Amino acid sequence: MNEIVTNRSEIVFLYDIKDGNPNGDPLDDNKPRIDEETGINLVTDVRLKRTIRDYLYKYKKEEIFIREIEDDKGHIQDAKARARDFLTIEEPVNTLQEGKNNINENLLKECIDARLFGVTIPLELKIKDKKTTKSQKSSIIHTGPVQFKIGKSMHRVFIKHFRGTGAFASKTETSQKTFREEDFLPYSLINFYGIINENAAKGTLLTENDIKLLLDGIWNGTSNLISRTKFGQVPRLLLKVNYSVNSYHIGDINGLLKLVSDTIDEEIRDISQVKLELAPLLRKLSINKDKVANIEYLADDNLSFVVDNDPVNLKDSLEDIGIQTKIITL
């Protein structure tokens, strides 16, 4: 499982949330991100990557580069200082390239998020000189093999505004309590799309075991994100299409999954009120099946699938068009 990734893959990930805020906008009072023209809920790729990073670090004990570290004085470490954590030769170094190579080697060896998502790191190292010691600047840049687009709800959403009282007084010597206000979504089923690029994997030394941990982080990281605004997130579908042809993928296959419901979008409140129409995806996969090695998947039992509105089983539907399937084990 430690082989470098050699095949391209596309990922589709669906999860839902009830009475929560999947991704607040700090520039808009932390309200859920909404496309004002379509009423679609948006979740940034940064939010999903943070979920994965936190899960791998806290639950799987994997080192990650991007995390908040405080020094003895309570100051948060900057990127240059974080880079020095991976310098294992004595500073000042003989040459800038020597120090850069040392950091890069250790960083990719130790940090799974750098191997997955890439990294851009500013460097400033002390360099030996005949008469004195001087500092030189450089950077380490790796394009991430794993990239996600912005997640979007598969239906228009309804924002609910809530106002309540706080636990403390608004000021000293008063009986008036503070007020708190927040916005949340009664329901949102969110659709994420991603690609694993086998060419970029060579640069970060991304392994098949890293991908297994990625899938674990996507699924279990989502369900284990138990904060006040994220509590109640449930992973519903994880689909990984593995290709046998180098540098090829169908593209945006998440858009080929269609939501079917007898309930109007803004009144959807539960996964039982929707079905996932597979027909467009199956047609596209069937046309390209000679380029598909297999499909790995994990589906929640409460998610229903249909083909042209007739109930179907996901595994049977894929195998009926001649594609091998495998259940993802986490």
Image (cartoon, rainbow, N blue to C red):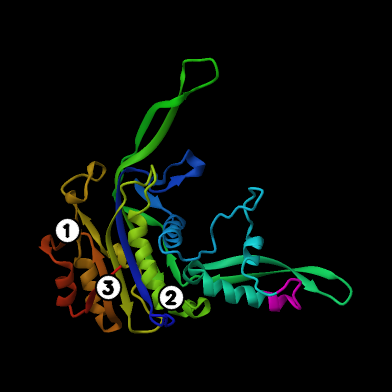
Pointer 2 residue: 197
Extreme front residue here? 72
Magenta span includes 97 = yes
* Residue 318 vertical position relative to residue 276 in the rendered view, above or below: below
Magenta span includes 200 = no
* Image quadrant in which you'd find residue 314: bottom left
- How packed mark 3 is, by other alpha carbons closer than 10 Å (few <14, some 14-19, many 20 or more), is some
Lower position in the chain sequence, tag 3 or tag 2? 2
Real-space CA distance between mark 1 and mark 3, rounded to the nearest whole angstrom? 18 Å
Real-space CA distance between mark 3 and mark 2, rounded to the nearest whole angstrom? 17 Å
Extreme right residue here? 131
Q: Read off the magenta span.
A: 90-99
Quadrant containing the C terminus in the rendered view: bottom left
Q: Nearer the viewer, mark 1 or mark 3?
A: 3
Residue at image position (34%, 43%) is 20
Q: Which mark is residue 304?
A: 1
- How packed mark 1 is, by other alpha carbons closer than 10 Å (few <14, some 14-19, many 20 or more), is some
Predominant SS along the magenta part: loop
Q: Position of residue 249 (x, y in %)?
A: 36, 76
Q: Is residue 93 left or right of residue 213?
A: right
